Amino acid sequence: MNKPTAVATVFALVLTAVGLAGCGNPEEPHVEGPAPSPSQVSGPVYVTDTLGHPLTRPTGFALTEFSSLSRLSWRSWGRPKAVATGRTGGVWCIPDCPANGYPATVELSRLQRRENVSYYTRAVVRAPGLPHDQASELRNVRLPVPEP
C-alpha cells in the first residue's frame, strides 16, 4: 500500500469510528416544566366556502356542495369556537323546504394557522326538524383550508 492510500484509509477509519461513537452525551434529554400552552390566535380568522373563498363573519355561504347557510348572526368569532344562529337548506329538501330553510345553530371550530391568518376547519350544524340523513351529514363538516 502506498503512503497516500494508507493515510486516506486511516483517515476514513478514524472518521467512521467517530461517527459511530457519536460526539456527545449518550444520556436522554432532560425536559422540565409544563408543556407550552397553545398559541393565541392572532391575525384575521376566516371560514372558507366550498369554492375556497375566505370569508369573515359571513351572513351566508355554501357549507357543502348540497347545503348552505343563510341569515347568519354571529355571537362569537375569532375564538377557538365561533357560534352563529341562522338558517340552513339545500338541494336535498327541494321542493319541500320550509320558507327560508330550517332554523339552525352553527359552530365552527378547529382553527388552523396559515401564514399570518387562521381558518376554521370544522363545522357542526344543529337544526331541529332537519331530515335525519341531512342532520347526520351536517354534524361534522370538514371545511376547506387553502394550501400553505
Image (spheres, rainbow, N blue to C red):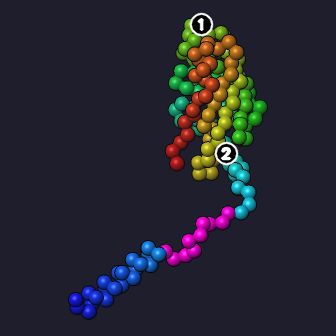
Q: Residues within 10 Å of mark 2 (few under 14, many from 20)?
A: few
Please state which of residues 93 and 11 is positioned toward the viewer in this rendering: 11
* Residue ID at (49%, 74%): 22
Q: Is residue 58 left or right of residue 23?
A: right
In the picture, the quarter occupied by the N terminus is: bottom left
Q: Which residue is mark 1?
A: 96
* Residue ID at (66%, 24%): 125
Please identify the residue farthest to the top as the structure is shown: 96
Please identify the residue farthest to the bottom as the structure is shown: 3
**Badge 2 amino acid:** Pro
* Residue ID at (71%, 37%): 81
* Residue ID at (60%, 37%): 121
**Nearer the viewer's eye, disc 1 or disc 2?**
1
Vertical position of residue 126 compared to residue 46: above or below: above
Q: Which residue is mark 2?
A: 44
Vertical position of residue 82 compared to residue 10: above or below: above
As measured in the structure, the alpha-carbon distance from the residue carrying label 1 to the one carrying label 2 is 38 Å
**Badge 1 amino acid:** Asp
Q: Provide the major secondary structure of the magenta segment.
A: loop
Q: Which residues are magenta?
A: 22-31
Q: Quadrant of residue 132?
A: top right
Please identify the residue farthest to the left as the structure is shown: 1
Please state which of residues 11 and 107 is positioned toward the viewer in this rendering: 11
Mark 1 or 2, nearer chain start: 2
**Residue 100: in sight, yes or no?**
no
Q: Quadrant of residue 49?
A: top right
Vertical position of residue 1 compared to residue 25: above or below: below
Q: Position of residue 9 (x, y in %)?
A: 31, 84
Verify whether residue 133 appears in magenta.
no
